[in-house]
Every structure is written in C-alpha cells, then in structure tokens.
Amino acid sequence: MNTYKVNSKINLADLHTKEINVNAKKELKKIRKEISKLQDKMYAHGKYSMLICLQGMDTSGKDSLIREVFKDVNANGVSVHSFKVPTETELKHDFLWRHYIVLPERGKIAVFNRTHYENVLVTRVHKNYIFGENIPNVKTETDLNDAFYHNRMEAIINFENHIAANGTIILKFFLNLSKDEQKNRLLRRLNLPEKNWKFSAGDLKERKHWDKYMFCYEDLLNRTSKEYAPWYIIPADEKATARLLVAKTILKTLAKYEDMQYPTINEETKANISVYKEELNNE
C-alpha cells in the first residue's frame, strides 16, 4: 500500500482520483472478516488500540466507507465519532480536547469521520470560526497567519506521537475526490427524491472554496504524515475501490503486530479443562 502512503512531498494536482478494481466488492467481503478476527485478537491481547482518521471533501464517501469496511467487526469493538461544529463546552477547552476524550480504549477501533484536522482546514478557510475559541492574543484575522496553523499542526503531531507511544495504531486516509465527481454526486442527491435529504445548500457554498481546501489539504498532508501516523491518499471517485484500498491498508497494518496474540490460560485451568467440561455436562 506504499503507492498511496505519503512518504515524500506530494502535489495533489499530480495525483489521480479514480481507480477501478472490478472485484472490489468481492475482495472487501473477505478482508473485512479478517479485520474482524484481528480486532478480536487485539481486544483479547489488551495492549493496542487503533485510530482510523477519515478526511475528504463533502460527498467523498466517508459514511458509506465506514459502513462497508467495518460491517463484520463486533459492534462493541468499533466506535465512530463525527465532529461537527464545536459545542459551547468544547469551545471552553483547547481544540484537541474533544478528540482526546473519545480516543479508543485498548483493544478497540475508533473511527474519526472528519477529525482533529478540521482545525487546520475549515478554520483556515473560514478564519472567523477561530474567534469562538477565545484564544489569548488572537484578536483579528491578521493573527491567523500560516505560522498559527503550522503551530497547530505541530500540536497535532505531538498529540499523535503521544498516543502512538502509548499503544494507539494510527492510520489517516484522505479520500481524494475530483471536483467533477463531487458535482455528479451532488446532482444525484438533487435528482433522486430518496437522496434529497442528504443535500445541503452549504455544500455548494463550500464547493466555491475548493481551491483553498486543496491548498490546505496539500499543506497538512506534507507536514503531518509521520511513520507512526501516516497519511494515505486514496483515489475516491470510485467508491468500491476506495473502500477496498482502505480495508487492505487496515488489514496489512494490523497483521504487522505479530506480538498481538490471545492470552494463554494458567496451568491450573488448562489442567482441569476436562474436569470443568464434565461438571457442565453432568448438570
């Protein structure tokens, strides 16, 4: 999966947004069962957790990807968190607080559908959002320069380094959607009555900032992809293949942790298994 991993400086304009695997759905069915088995082992082992970060423009397929990739994982083993506009309580804390408090427990997988990177994306495009945080020394938009956002990225890097050092396996996926495909998906929401509810006029407003978002994404992808918390740029114009690529990356990553094993039972229990079985059978 190194084809998609950000290992060196990238230019989003140079990357393709569409890849098709005609067997994607069939392959995904097998892979998600393997992910489920490894999550079960991770839970029993009790030393690791996994954080999956999904970022992408509106309609890039984050929701359906979560549904399809984690369909076979024990419901108690995976949690999904979608970060909307910060609440009044969240704004009373630093910008990472609301993410920290929902990190996965050891043995479990957490999926962030939109993530802590929104704090260097949406707020960089719409700088006025920052003022709700009441940060000392931030009085006007001139205070929100590149250095401000790069400092935030450093804080994110330190945050991820800290949780990685404490057993959280981090994978970050940018679903790289083309502007033309986004247009098609928005039109589909408008053309199909059963999809109308998914449409928001705000999607069109954000679409007008496409180039600015691409600049912000490219900057953060180049600055924050680390070996302990890598970014993968996934071509997202074809949903089935995008889901498969994400699932393959998750499976391959989990499989690397060979120390992750089911615990062995103590000698007394092991020696008396036949006795316990007999006791139950004779009830």
Image: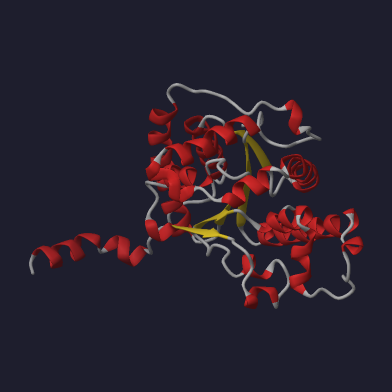
Q: Which of 41 and 246 is in front in this view?
A: 246
Q: In this view, does 79 lie to the left or right of 7?
A: left
Q: In which quarter of the image is the C terminus?
A: bottom left
Where residue 35 sits in the image (x, y, percent)?
A: 45, 44
Q: Which residue is drawn at 63% across and 51% down?
A: 170
Would you say residue 151 is visible in this rendering? Answer: yes
Q: Which of 156 and 149 is in front in this view?
A: 149
- Say which of 67 and 86 sits in front: 86
In the rendered image, the vertical position of residue 102 relative to residue 249, given as above or below = below
Quadrant location of residue 264? bottom left
Image height check: is 47 above or below 31?
Answer: below
- The residue lying at 47 percent from left, 32 percent from top is 240
Quarter in which the N terminus is drawn: top right
Residue 88 in the image: state x and y as whole percent. Answer: 64, 76
Q: Where is residue 22 in the image (x, y as percent from the top left)?
A: 45, 21
User: Relative to 218, is 276 on the left or the right?
Assistant: left
Point out residue 185 in the picture as x, y percentages from the top left corner: 52, 36
